Image (spheres, rainbow, N blue to C red):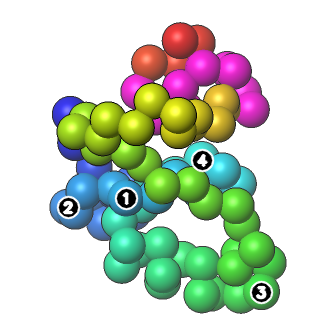
Amino acid sequence: MKIQCNACEAAEAKVLCCADEAALCWECDEKVHAANKLAGKHQRVLLLSASSSNPSYRVPKCDICQGCSVCKRGG
């Protein structure tokens, strides 16, 4: 399942910004986080595609629900 970019709503999201709680495509991520120094310091993590098969990779949990911050909340 592809996740749509929260900013442009057109491209596939590639990163999750923890501070903004937003899934962004590469282009929007660059625009948003180049806006100022504070935004540039936001922690961002790569979103894994469904085809990723690296079992050792752990996706950080959402600060709010402690579950998957992208799809099933409270997972």
The residue carrying pointer 3 sits among few (fewer than 14), some (14 to 19) or many (20 or more) residues within 10 Å by Cα, namely: few
The residue carrying pointer 1 sits among few (fewer than 14), some (14 to 19) or many (20 or more) residues within 10 Å by Cα, namely: many
Say which residue label 2 marks: 10
Please report contact status of discs 3 and 2: CB closer than 8 Å, yes or no: no
Considering depth in this image, is 44 or 23 the residue closer to the camera? Answer: 44
What residue is shown at x 76% (from left), y 74% (from top)? 41
Magenta stretch, main secondary structure, is loop
The mark that comes first in sequence, 4 or 2, is: 2
Q: Amino acid at mark 4?
A: Glu
Say which residue label 4 marks: 21
The mark that comes first in sequence, 4 or 1, is: 1
The residue carrying pointer 4 sits among few (fewer than 14), some (14 to 19) or many (20 or more) residues within 10 Å by Cα, namely: some
The residue carrying pointer 2 sits among few (fewer than 14), some (14 to 19) or many (20 or more) residues within 10 Å by Cα, namely: few
Which region of the structure is painted magenta?
Answer: 63-71
Q: Secondary structure at mark 2?
A: loop
Say which residue label 1 marks: 14
Say which residue label 3 marks: 37
Considering depth in this image, is 67 or 8 the residue closer to the camera? Answer: 67
Above or below for 22 versus 55: below
Please report contact status of discs 3 and 1: CB closer than 8 Å, yes or no: no
The mark that comes first in sequence, 4 or 3, is: 4
